[in-house]
Amino acid sequence: MAIGAVMYMHGFSYGGYILTIGFLLTTYGMILWFRDVIIEATYLGHHTKEVKNGIMMGVLLFIVSEISLSYPYFELSFIQVYHQLLK
């Protein structure tokens, strides 16, 4: 998908097609993965207490990482607006 995006942005022929194929394959893989997780959790009962704790910890770490990566950008934009107001 990334190669298709770069090719599309640089105007290569068939870059859009490669980007679309990469997007569709990624979406298809996500659908299959979520389907398997739902089947394992709902119908098969494979999610034990340890697995549930691991999933919860993974989601928590993802949220913390997104906050820690996004905070500097919001802070920078706030500082720029604040300094423009002081001028």
Image (tube, grey):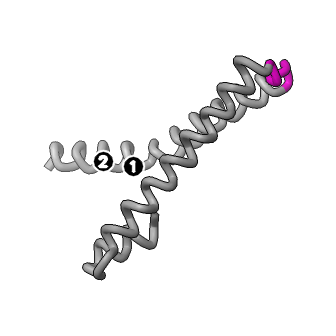
Horizontal side, residue 83 vs residue 6: left or right: left
Helix, strand or loop for the magenta stretch, by majority: loop
Determine the residue positioned at 43% across, 56% down: 23
Looking at the picture, tell me which residue is in the foreground, 51 or 34.
Answer: 34
Residue 14 location, x and y as percent?
32, 76
Residue 19 is situated, as x and y percent measured from the top left of the image, at 38, 65
Task: Write down the region rendered in magenta.
Answer: 45-50
Q: Quick one: SS at disc 2?
A: helix
Q: Is residue 12 magenta?
A: no
Q: Which residue is mark 2?
A: 77
Q: What amino acid type is highlighted by mark number 1?
A: Tyr
Q: Is residue 34 above or below residue 43?
A: below
Residue for badge 1:
73
Number of the label disc, if any, that sits on residue 17 = none
Along the viewing direction, whichever of 84 and 3 lies nearer the viewer: 3
Mark 1 neighbour class, 10 Å CA radius: few under 14, some 14 to 19, many 20 or more: few
Residue 81 falls in which quadrant of the image?
top left
